Image (tube, rainbow, N blue to C red):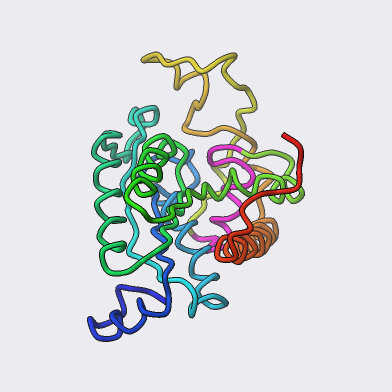
Amino acid sequence: MYIAKLSKETFAQAIKEIKTVVIPIGSIEAHGSHCPLSTDIIVPEHILSLMEKTHGDKILIAPSVNYGYTPSLAYFPGTVHISGETLTNYVFELAQGWVKWGAEYIILFNGHGGNTAALTLVANKVAESGATCVLVNWWQNYSKEILEICDAQGHAGEDETSVVLAIDPDLVDMSKAGVHDKQLMASIFAPDAIHYSYPDALNGDARKASVEKGEAIYEAVCQSFAKMLERLWAKDWTDNKPI
């Protein structure tokens, strides 16, 4: 159920029964020369649109946070970057707003890797305030499933290009899809590090992407996310795996 489509009366009724608010979070940034700047927004939004069809009576989907922390890609045209402090404070206050109205579970459904550190702080602050918060980085949490479909994962690479293609092939210019299959030897932060890690704002092999792979990824991610939700609500929070 989309919160933005509800009136104050219908929201007040819905929050009595539905205690889980999902906040999609992304960024506006370069994704190679072939994918749209909005990739990290439209992908989590599409996943949640699919979830709304099956779990719309169990989750409340909040409006998206469209800007994120992306200093490494600020070099490329179209990338708009906000500070980690701003992102942390903003998302925490949004989460607190939904908790105020009765939400017991806040799910931060993230589409951008650069947001992860800030959103981890948010999740801890929400927990300290008395609610339960889950941070879902869709490409990371469901990496095992994705790698059964794609050979590799990467920024604007095979997997990410595929999921955009599955939304709308007209959003992707496959004639400009490229490959960069090298990684930094360590977590190096330097003014020119981007030229080694993400030249042309790309990491991976976008040439291998397809609509079919994207559709398969969405199906796998939605199935796994649905299972996670059911376990979350049942408080079945641990796995029977040795540490």
Residue 29 in the image, given as x and y percentages of width and height: 38, 41
Above or below, 56 relative to 87: below
Residue 86, magenta (yes or no):
no
Left or right: where 206 falls relative to 187: right
Relative to residue 199, is residue 189 depicted above or below?
Answer: above
160 magenta-colored: yes
* Residue 94 horizontal side relative to residue 227, left or right: left
Residue occupying image coordinates x 56% and y 15%: 186
Q: The magenta stretch spans which residues?
A: 154-170
Quadrant of the drawing holding the N terminus: bottom left
Q: Residue 168's spot in the image, x, y percent?
A: 52, 63
Front residue of this view, candidates 197 and 94:
94
* Residue at the image point whose x is 44% and y is 57% from the top: 107
In terms of image quadrants, where is residue 22? bottom left
Residue 183: x and y in percent read: 60, 22
Please tell me which residue is depicted at 43% across the width and 61% down the height of the picture: 105
Count of numbered labels shown in the rendering? 0
**Residue pictured at 57% horizontal, 57% vertical:** 165
Q: Identify which residue, 6 or 192, lies in the foreground.
A: 6
Image x and y of residue 90, in percent: 25, 47
Magenta segment main secondary structure: helix
Q: Quadrant of the C terminus?
A: top right
Left-right relation of 170 to 95: right
Q: Quadrant of residue 98?
A: bottom left
Q: Quadrant of residue 69?
A: top left
- 203 in relation to 107, above or below: above
